Each structure stands twice: as structure tokens, then as C-alpha cells.
Amino acid sequence: MSKALTKSQIASAIAEKAELSKKQAVAILEIIAALAYKNAKNSFTLPGLGKLVLVHRKARLGRNPATGETIQIKAKKVVKFRVAKAAKDAILGAK
């Protein structure tokens, strides 16, 4: 199994494909990340990849794996990434 691409490797690939400097490619990645962080509350879509959405989880009962004791888990907000259909089809192959 191959390792995940690093930020530097992604920036290099973007720089090569778009004929940019590596510094410009890194800046683009940082801008996209900042936009995602700022707009995730309203959902942030990366066309062709997916979207970041804020989800409210309800309170629920859970179990402490060490002791087996039942515990109450509080309600909370979590950020989820929903993968786009186009990305699923490209990675897994269309059905």
C-alpha cells in the first residue's frame, strides 16, 4: 500500500500541471484550506471531490470499552466530509 501524498508533493504536482512555481501552488493550497475552514459552517464544496458540512450529533448512550460501563455521550457538532459521486466513481469505478 502506498503512502498518502504530502503537502509538498501535492504542491509540486499542481505547480507542474498548471505551470506555476511551487510557492504559488502552496499559496493556492493554503487559500483553499482557509476558505474551507471559514465556510464549513455553511458547507464548503470542492467541485468534483466533495463537501464539508457541519452536522449536529444527538446525545446518546455509549460504552466505556475498558470497563464496559454505560456512559452518556453529550450532543455535539462535528464536521464531516461527504465525498462527491464523481469522486466515488473515479476511485471505485462506476457501477
Image (tube, rainbow, N blue to C red):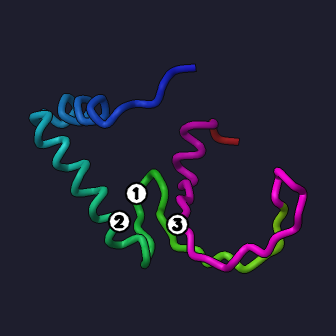
| Residue assigned mark 2 | 37
Magenta region, residue range: 64-92
- Dot 2: few (<14), some (14–19), or many (≥20) neighbours within 10 Å? few
Q: Is residue 36 left or right of residue 83?
A: left
| Residue assigned mark 1 | 47
Question: What x and y, as percent, mark residue 75?
Answer: 67, 79
Q: Residue at x 40, y 57 (%)?
A: 47
Give the distance between the C-alpha atoms of the residues marked 3 and 1, in whole angstroms: 18 Å
Q: Quadrant of the N terminus?
A: top right
Q: Give the residue type at disc 3.
A: Val
| Residue assigned mark 3 | 79
Q: Is residue 77 left or right of residue 69?
A: left
- Which numbered disc, 2 or 3, marks the residue that appears first in the sequence? 2
Question: What x and y, as percent, mark residue 49?
Answer: 46, 51
Local secondary structure at mark 1? loop
- Quick one: 26 or 51, which is closer to the camera? 26
- Which numbered disc, 1 or 2, marks the residue that appears first in the sequence? 2
Q: Nearer the viewer, mark 1 or mark 2?
A: 2
